[in-house]
Image: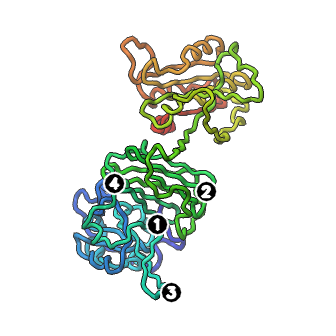
């Protein structure tokens, strides 16, 4: 997001309006363009030299880092190591050195206030300036920084090994709160992180060998329900971005709840794992109608068991009489989209087929205007095709419906379509029954599949 000023741009007093040539720029070396810098920041390289940790920075500590090969600058309370950025800066190294080892906020605002430095320098973030407070009781100086766990100065801390137990920090921008977990373990991946947010309670569990590290808080303010998780595997750093509902400053991260900031043996965690699943019908075939059951107390799910997964092996070992918790239904799909529908196209991959079950049943039973329903079902092998016989029998019984199977790793005997979702496959599949027919396209599967399908 670009922070564009409300007045005319550039502003009348801006350096970009100085003389006819604008603000002077320095010719950059080959391989030092903006795109080269973006590629570098996404490479996973440690640009701060601090192994992914954040620190509270005193004024005395900031002043020590005032050389080209060790240059820290403070902007709006956040401290960045800009040494790696020196050769990429369009204004040249000397311009950056004007703020070396000091607070460069005023200088930054004078020259290019509209630049989104938070995004450009995110991987160079060293930490946040410590806030000086005077204790009313003891009149001694204290340094306070909400969310920043390391308490000693950077120079002293780097000289010794970090703690064995994981730790966490947090910082915020206008629209985001970022929680950073330092596991001190290489080889971490997204499967090791379970994040849940319900009723203002935020819970992040990081699985480290046979232990779980928990972040469990009632957050200071509400957040949106979509958040992102990134893992820097080579340093074991986990970043969780939370989107604020209101773009206001948080005074602190929130109130600690049970087992917050604790490393617990997994057998003692009582770990709650939450997974979304789509209820399905009992069958696709009309003669196999769902039985009449008392009090609507049966729900059908179609779940693939992953032997190395966190959730499905536990579910697979449940016995009749065991309990699982089921939430209220979630989602925003509206049946009104089916009104006067003529052509329905369904694209599914793997277990992304499950939402299509009830869509197929409802569409073929309740939409009199429907002319055609087509399902393109992507799988790896023939053995992976869910409900293949029912899908083929349904096509035989209802002439409005047709199914195509596409395999990415077929045997030599396979005579059907092969490959992954592509413009060629989709354009051939999406053919209307009439030139101006009303069309609905539904797609579900792994994220790369859905993103490619949408494109």
**Residue annotated with mark 3:** 137
Q: Does 64 sit above or below residue 248?
A: below
**Residue annotated with mark 1:** 147
Specify how the rendered protein is coloured: rainbow
- N-terminal of the two: label 1 or label 3? 3
Mark 3 or 2, closer to the camera? 3
Helix, strand or loop for disc 1: loop
In the picture, the disc for residue 273 is none
- N-terminal of the two: label 2 or label 1? 1
Callout 3 touching callout 2 (CB < 8 Å): no
- Position of 226 compared to 75: left or right? right
- Answer with the quarter of the image where residue 302 lies: top right
- Answer with the quarter of the image where residue 337 lies: top right
- N-terminal of the two: label 3 or label 2? 3
**Residue annotated with mark 4:** 184
Residue 193 % position (x, y): 45, 46
**Residue annotated with mark 2:** 200
Residue 48 % position (x, y): 30, 63
Residue at horizontal 22 percent and vertical 69 percent from the top? 69
- N-terminal of the two: label 4 or label 3? 3
């Amino acid at each position: 997001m670009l922070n564009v000023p409300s007045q005319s741009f550039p502003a009348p007093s801006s350096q970009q309006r100085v003389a006819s040539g604008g603000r002077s720029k320095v010719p950059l070396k080959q391989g030092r363009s903006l795109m080269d810098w973006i590629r570098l920041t996404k490479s996973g390289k440690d640009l701060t030299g601090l192994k992914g940790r954040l620190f509270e920075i005193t004024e005395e500590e900031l002043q020590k880092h005032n050389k080209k090969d060790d240059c820290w600058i403070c902007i709006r309370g956040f401290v960045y190591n800009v040494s790696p950025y020196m050769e990429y800066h369009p204004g040249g190294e000397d311009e950056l050195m004007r703020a070396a080892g000091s607070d460069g906020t005023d200088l930054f605002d004078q020259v290019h206030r509209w630049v989104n430095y938070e995004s450009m320098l995110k991987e160079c973030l060293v930490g946040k300036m410590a806030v000086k407070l005077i204790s009313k009781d003891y009149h001694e100086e204290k340094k306070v920084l909400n969310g920043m766990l390391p308490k000693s100065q950077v120079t002293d801390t780097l000289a010794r090994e970090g703690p064995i137990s994981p730790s966490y920090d947090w910082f915020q921008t206008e629209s985001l709160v970022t929680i950073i977990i330092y596991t001190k373990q290489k080889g971490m991946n997204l499967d090791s992180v379970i994040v849940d947010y319900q009723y203002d309670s935020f819970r992040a569990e990081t699985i480290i060998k046979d232990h779980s590290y928990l972040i469990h808080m009632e957050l200071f303010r509400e957040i949106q329900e979509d958040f992102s998780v990134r893992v820097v595997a080579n340093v074991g750093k986990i970043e969780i971005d939370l989107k604020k509902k209101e773009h206001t400053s948080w005074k602190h991260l929130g109130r600690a709840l049970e087992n917050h900031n604790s490393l617990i043996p997994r057998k003692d965690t009582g770990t709650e794992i939450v997974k979304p699943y789509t209820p399905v019908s009992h069958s696709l075939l009309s003669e196999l109608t769902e039985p009449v059951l008392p009090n609507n107390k049966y729900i059908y799910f179609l779940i693939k068991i992953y032997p190395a997964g966190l959730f499905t092996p536990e579910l697979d070992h449940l016995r009749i009489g065991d309990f699982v918790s089921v939430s209220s239904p979630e989602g925003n799909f509206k049946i009104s989209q089916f009104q006067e529908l003529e052509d329905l196209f369904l694209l599914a991959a793997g277990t992304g087929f499950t939402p299509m079950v009830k869509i197929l049943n409802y569409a073929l039973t309740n939409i009199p205007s429907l002319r055609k329903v087509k399902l393109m079902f992507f799988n790896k092998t023939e053995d992976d095709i869910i409900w293949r016989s029912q899908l083929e029998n349904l096509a035989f019984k209802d002439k409005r419906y047709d199914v195509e199977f596409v395999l990415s790793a077929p045997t030599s005997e396979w005579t059907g379509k092969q490959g992954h979702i592509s413009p060629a496959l989709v354009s051939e599949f999406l053919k209307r029954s009439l030139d101006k027919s009303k069309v609905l396209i539904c797609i579900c599967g792994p994220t790369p599949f859905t993103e490619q399908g949408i494109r």
